[in-house]
Image (tube, rainbow, N blue to C red):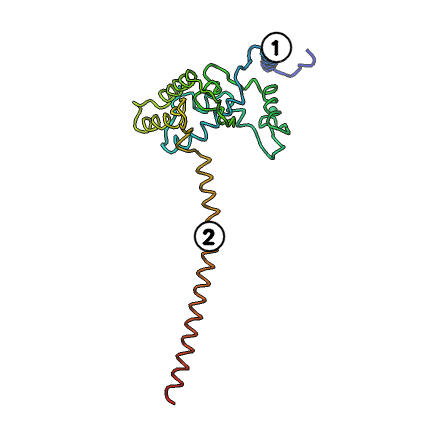
Amino acid sequence: MLCCAGVPPSLLLVALLSACSLLLVAGRNQDQEFHGAARSRILLQDPHKHEVHCSRERSRAAWEAIDEYLMPFVEKEKYELPSKCRLRPDNDMFREQEQHKIHFDINEWRCGFCKKAFRAEKFLDQHFENRHKNLLDNSEGRCLADLCGALHCDMMMEFKKPKSKCNAAAALRNRHLCESLADSCFPINQGLAASRLHEFFLRQFCDAHTCNRGTKHFPKGGRKQTNRFYLALCVLTLILLPLFYLIVFLHQREMKKGAQDLRRFSKIGQKKKPS
Ligand SMILES: [Zn+2]
């Protein structure tokens, strides 16, 4: 007890208790870390846990159709898609990963999670598959590719020529899927905006599911088309505006010249009169 000489016993007890609790906490943390690591290892070792049976490419095409031909109209109506609607961005299992794609250049893609760079989008897709699969929530109803029949994914993926023979049964199936989407996303009893969008969705997406020739896909247009229209309008204005000013300038110059000539002639006339 030589080392503890002069130290009150109560203080020693407190110090001893603190040391014990520190050891206990450290032990528990180690335990948690061990169990955490074991759990993640179990997750990593279980190949079926995160197996995804959903095409990323077709899901992307479906999202493009939604984003281009539906969302501008939904935004215009200031309508919020109900949570059960499968067209909602957060019901697309790949949305988070797709939003973490950084596209610097034609040949440079970067992973937004770990900043690794890739030469092409397909390699980044592969990287997501290998490294960030744990971020996918592939619970039921979150595979957008399942809605491809209704959303005209083939057309979005630029398989331009439709099959020569139309399959009437498939067209009818797609039409039913399309109409069920309209019902769940825009219930007509949910107000004016919902009923307007319900009608719009039927015309924009569902009418084309028929074997009748001449039915137009996305007849109401989309985001890109309006953007292209405004771009063309801007370019035309930029070309026509200087031309307009040039014509005005030349016209004014001619007018001024004409007025000067007139003044000169009238002066000559005045000078000649007295004689
Ligand atoms: Zn990464």
Alpha-carbon neighbours of circle 1 within 10 Å: few (<14), some, or many (≥20)? few
Residue at position x 62%, y 28% in the image: 120
Q: Residue furthest front?
A: 164
* Disc 2: which residue: 240
Quadrant of the drawing holding the N terminus: top right
- What amino acid is at disc 1? Gln
Alpha-carbon neighbours of circle 2 within 10 Å: few (<14), some, or many (≥20)? few
- Identify the mark nearer the N-term, 1 or 2: 1
Residue at position x 31%, y 23% in the image: 188
* Disc 1: which residue: 45
Front residue of 195/127: it is: 195
Give the image location of residue 8, x and y in percent. 61, 15
Q: Is residue 12 visible?
A: no
The reply, left or right, for residue 24 in relation to residue 83 is right
Closer to the camera: disc 1 or disc 2?
2
Front residue of 73/40: it is: 73
Quarter-of-image position of residue 30: top right
Task: Find the distance from the CA under tag 1 to the CA under tag 2.
Answer: 66 Å
- What amino acid is at disc 2? Leu
Q: Is mark 1 within 8 Å of ligand 1?
A: no
Dot 2 lies on which element? helix
Give the image location of residue 116, x and y in percent. 63, 27
